[in-house]
Amino acid sequence: MRPMFTVHAGEFLVGQHIETSFKDKRVWLPSKDTGVDLLVTNARHSRSVTLQVKFSRDFLPIMKLAASTRQHLRACTWFSFDRNKIARSPADFRALVLLGFENKSRDYLVVRKREADTLASEFE
């Protein structure tokens, strides 16, 4: 087994959040890229879910927005999705990480695989 990649910021943030918020859960990293970024198990390792994590930088600091608009935003980013990749992915959940630099905020949007499939087909 050779390390093929390192943990990216989004995976680190999601893993850290799970470990600090859910003390009875364990977070595991794969040894190779299979479309699953994190494996989460209960303490007895008898149940598990898989996560694919998406992370993008916060563009809010460089956006030219009115102050009245900016004050309502914690972060501003976007994600691009490929319907075929979503359909083929073995991950049970998608975790989108919204990291706000100006507001020092962290938000996570977690979507079940079947909901992601449905959303992807609606936007074709």
Image (tube, rainbow, N blue to C red):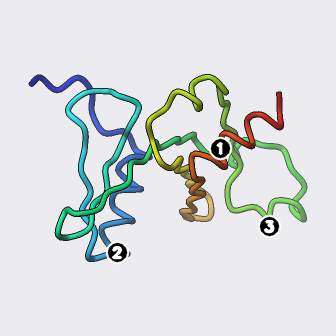
Query: Callout 1, which amino acid?
Result: Ala
- Above or below residue 100? Residue 31 is above
Q: Which mark is nearer the camera, 3 or 1?
A: 1
Q: Earlier in the sequence, mark 3 or mark 1?
A: 3
Q: Quadrant of the N terminus?
A: top left
- Rounded to the nearest angstrom, the CA distance separating label 3 from label 1 is 30 Å
Residue under numbered circle 1: 116
Please report the residue visible at 39 percent of the width from the left and 65 percent of the height from the top.
Answer: 17
Kindly indicate the quadrant of the structure image that contains residue 47: bottom left
Viewer-nearest residue: 95 or 75: 95
Question: What amino acid is at disc 2?
Answer: Phe
Q: CA distance from mark 3 to mark 2?
A: 31 Å
Do labels 3 and 1 touch, CB within 8 Å?
Answer: no
Q: Which residue is mark 2?
A: 22
Q: Judging from the image, what secondary structure is the residue with disc 1 in?
A: helix
Who's the residue at 78% across and 43% down the image? 63
| Mark 3 surroundings within 10 Å by alpha-carbon count, few (fewer than 14), some (14 through 19), many (20 or more) | few
Residue 118 pos. (x, y %):
73, 42
* Sequence-first disc among 3 and 2: 2
Do the residues under discs 3 and 2 have CB atoms within 8 angstroms?
Answer: no
Left or right, 83 with reference to 53: right
| Camera-nearest label, 1 or 2 | 1
